[in-house]
Image: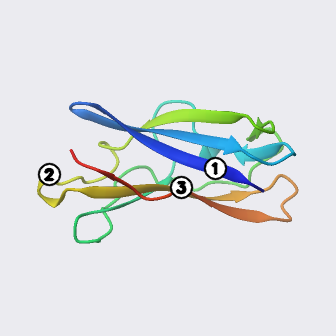
Amino acid sequence: MRVETSLKIIKQMPKLAVLVSIKNIDSKVFYIEKMNAPMGEGVSKRIFDITDNAGAKVQYVGARPKLAGSGVNDYIPIEPRSKVEFTRRIDDVFKLDQGKTPFKIRYSVINVHRDEERVDEIQSDWFSFDL
């Protein structure tokens, strides 16, 4: 599994969102679980780590669903040298205190392969942002 992950902050105050890009740089198709690349509204689980200016984790207040194992139809294929992108609001699922900027964010998920024989941790680099 070889993927590159990048983030871009989108400010449309009072809303704050993150554009996530996951690019397959391997020669084989990569399958990411849909819950790790949600294309619909809202964050269905915690997919970001955020820290404040002191390095403390920012509290996640979003959904914490009990997720069943993924089936064969619960994956998005990413062809070689292709990418998927999705945008997720973060201001409604994290307690972002203006007095604790700048923040750092990274995309961080555990991805179980369709054959369930391998599990990958997919993480972006840390990215700094202000409110």
Foreground pick, 122 / 40 = 122
Q: Is residue 119 left or right of residue 92?
A: right
Q: Give the mark nearer the N terminus: 1 vs 2.
A: 1
Q: Element at badge 1?
A: strand
The residue at the point 22 percent across, 30 percent down is 13
Say whether residue 34 is visible: no
Counting from the top left corner in percent of width and height, residue 113 is at: 80, 56
Labels 1 & 2 near each other (Cβ < 8 A): no
What amino acid is at disc 2? Answer: Gln
Residue 98 got which mark?
2
What amino acid is at disc 1? Answer: Glu
Tell me how far mark 1 sits from mark 2, CA to CA.
30 Å
Q: Element at badge 3?
A: loop
Q: Is residue 114 left or right of residue 93?
A: right
Compared with 80, 52 (above or below) is below
| Quadrant into which the N terminus falls | bottom right
Q: Is residue 56 left or right of residue 82?
A: left
Among the 4 quarters of the image, the one containing residue 126: bottom left
The residue at the point 57 percent across, 32 percent down is 39
Q: Circle 1 is placed at which residue position?
A: 4
What amino acid is at disc 3? Answer: Ser
Q: Circle 3 is placed at which residue position?
A: 124
Counting from the top left corner in percent of width and height, residue 25 is at: 75, 46
Counting from the top left corner in percent of width and height, residue 74 is at: 74, 41
Q: Element at badge 2?
A: helix
The residue at the point 74 percent across, 50 percent down is 70
